[in-house]
Image (tube, grey):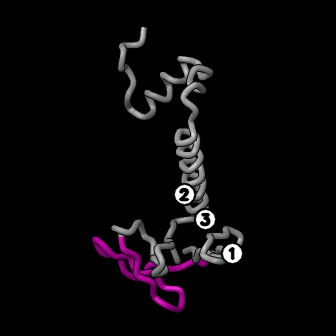
Amino acid sequence: MVRRGYDNDIHKRELDNFKEVVVIRKGSRYVTADSNTPFIFDVRNDFKIDNGRGKIAYGLYLCKQDYFDELEKDDLWKEIKRFFNTYDGKVHYSIPLKDLREIAKIIGVDGLIGGR
């Protein structure tokens, strides 16, 4: 389990606190983990507990690497969105057609013109 650390409502990874917990109860929707105090995680909330201000207070992961993978995924997604949101209309001419086709394939819009 990880307890996310915040400074002025901004997530600071260096303040995160990891604690090994034992799952004491599992159901079809809830998982209860115990580390002196029981925490109930909801499957529908991706095993996260909100801090009441829209931020994640606790998260349940099988291992630390799963947590770090999630952080990397979030960072990559933000960078990709930033790239396309600030994309200059003329810059796309500098991206090779092969690369544009690969991007289109990844996002599921390949074959618009039939690619020769």
* Residue 15 badge: 1
Residue 64 picture quarter: bottom right
- Find the distance from the CA under tag 3 to the CA under tag 2: 10 Å
What's the magenta region? 19-42
Above or below: residue 108 compared with residue 101: below
Does dot 2 land on a helix, a strand or a loop? helix
Q: Earlier in the sequence, mark 3 or mark 2?
A: 3
- Find the distance from the CA under tag 3 to the CA under tag 1: 15 Å
- Residue placed under numbered mark 3 in the picture: 64
Residue at the extreme front: 89
Residue at the extreme top: 116
The N terminus lies in which quarter of the figure?
bottom right
- Residue placed under numbered mark 2 in the picture: 70
**Image x and y of residue 10, in percent:** 62, 71
- Find the distance from the CA under tag 1 to the CA under tag 2: 17 Å
Residue 33 picture quarter: bottom left
**Image x and y of residue 5, in percent:** 63, 76
Three-letter code, disc 3: Lys
Query: Residue 98 magenta-drawn?
Result: no
* Residue 110 badge: none
Tag 3 and tag 1, C-beta contact below 8 Å:
no
Q: Residue at x 49, y 29 (%)?
A: 103
